[in-house]
Amino acid sequence: MTPAGASQTLRFSLPQSLQALSRVRDYARGEMLFRRGDPARSVFFVHSGEVRMLRSGRAGEDILLHRARPGEYFAEAAVDCPEYLCDALAFQRSTLTVIPKGRLATLLAHDRSFATQWNSVLMRELRMARARIERLALASVAERVRHFVLTEGRDDGCEVALAGSLKDLARDLGVTHEALYRTLARMEKAGEIIRDGNALRLAASRRGKRRPADR
Amino acid sequence: MTPAGASQTLRFSLPQSLQALSRVRDYARGEMLFRRGDPARSVFFVHSGEVRMLRSGRAGEDILLHRARPGEYFAEAAVDCPEYLCDALAFQRSTLTVIPKGRLATLLAHDRSFATQWNSVLMRELRMARARIERLALASVAERVRHFVLTEGRDDGCEVALAGSLKDLARDLGVTHEALYRTLARMEKAGEIIRDGNALRLAASRRGKRRPADR
DNA sequence: ACCCGCGTATGATCAAAATCATCAGGGGAG
DNA sequence: CTCCCCTGATGATTTTGATCATACGCGGGT
């Protein structure tokens, strides 16, 4: 599609100061970005595709540690760690920004305002990760959908623009796509949500009392 | 039990420089630590108990954003945010370290080595949160147990010392305690794991091929 | 000494989601 | 233009875990 140079317009933009010192690269599906024990050279940002962080036990049992999706940084730990702690594999064809660790460290040390910005980025990722944890701990698909809309939605919930396909969303919610299709259909029929193109909205009415999150 | 002053020995110790500027306090079950919109005054650390971060929609539907458990910081975002973004509620009687935001910010700005340390803490929390996400996305309880032991276990897996009860673990894994009891019993009978007091060990043999994490 | 509460444990039943299967429609590639 | 692949969608069947119920041992408090 795009020639290997990755010159298409990117959906996400990074801070100026970061763009100045990094480059954009495409990785083929199945390509290895780094392996555990490799000297940590770079921090990455995902524009498109998916990169998986794996820890491979000696018996071949791959444990999945993280799926880095578009809009996310990964291997941020490289900044203050001499070597990578796990393997990184481009699970799909992916466009990434590659940020040399050394230059990032220098920037962090000398540019106070950038350091603050970087901290905010990490904090945001942490908040989102934690919200996802609680979402995945919910028992039913419908509850996860509600949680998703309310936490990922613009201005305090009620509506989200879906970034990808419903299959992608299903994977995010930790359920099969079939279960998601059915649940969305049921919720729509019940008047609980409204689907409008790639937007998903919680109906203003049907806002039942959620008991204060037990278990 | 302990008089309100919270003078018992704490299980976790914070960096010296942090201890110097913070205080330890007990919170009663049900006590509100802060509400959304309150001026962000403090960052917290959980020694014992559980604090829940909630976003309360106007219709009374509480969305659980995070359960802060012993050994975790929370409301770290207070450092560079003028007001809290959600409510925090002591869900159980909890002992917390309260770290005044201003002093922490000063420390971060002036003490290069502390800033690095703090960054490592955040990165560690982020890595653990991401691993938990992938764990919760696993379909079966047994897979979650395996993932738990391999990621949380000492020296590259194979063994974990359980911090709390099996019920606590079950909640961490996002399943009912019954399901966990049964699964552990089945895995032990199958010779896949060994339970030794509060330790949980993966048997060296039974290390079946995990296919590279599909879905 | 007794009771209560909690963690551990196991059984029976039931609901929900996974799995497998099939099909329609749209968009891209040839 | 046609074919094929992918997403969306729905049905049938199976599996899993949630739920409810019961039981036992232990430690703390009255």
Image: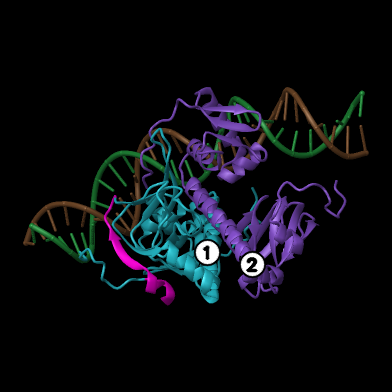
Chain colours: A purple, B cyan, C brown, D green
Q: Disc 1 vs disc 2: which is toward the camera? A: 2
- How packed mark 2 is, by other alpha carbons closer than 10 Å (few <14, some 14-19, many 20 or more), is few
Helix, strand or loop at mark 2: loop
Q: Is residue B158 visible?
A: no
Q: Is residue A5 left or right of residue B194?
A: right
Q: Residue B74: which numbered mark, if any?
A: none
Residues D15 and A71: in front is A71
Which residue is pictured at 45% across the width and 27% down the height? A206
Which residue is pictured at 43% across the width and 47% down the height? B86
**Amino acid, disc 2:** Asp
Q: Position of residue A130 (x, y in %)?
A: 50, 53
Q: Is residue B91 left or right of residue A125?
A: left
Q: Position of residue A76 (x, y in %)?
A: 63, 64
When the figure is inspected, residue A36 is found, relative to residue C22, above or below; the finding is: below
Q: Position of residue A109 (x, y in %)?
A: 62, 71
Chain ID at mark 2? A
- How packed mark 1 is, by other alpha carbons closer than 10 Å (few <14, some 14-19, many 20 or more), is many
Q: Residue B122: which numbered mark, if any?
A: 1
Based on the displayed image, in which of its 4 quarters is residue B162 positioned?
bottom left
Q: Position of residue B44 (x, y in %)?
A: 40, 61
Which residue is pictured at 60% across the width and 59% down the height? A117
Helix, strand or loop at mark 1: helix
Q: Which residues are magenta?
A: B12-30
In the rendered image, residues at marks 1 and 2 fall on the same chain: no
When the figure is inspected, residue A187 is found, relative to residue A133, above or below; the finding is: above
Residues B126 and C21: in front is B126
Chain ID at mark 1? B
Q: Residue A111: which numbered mark, if any?
A: 2
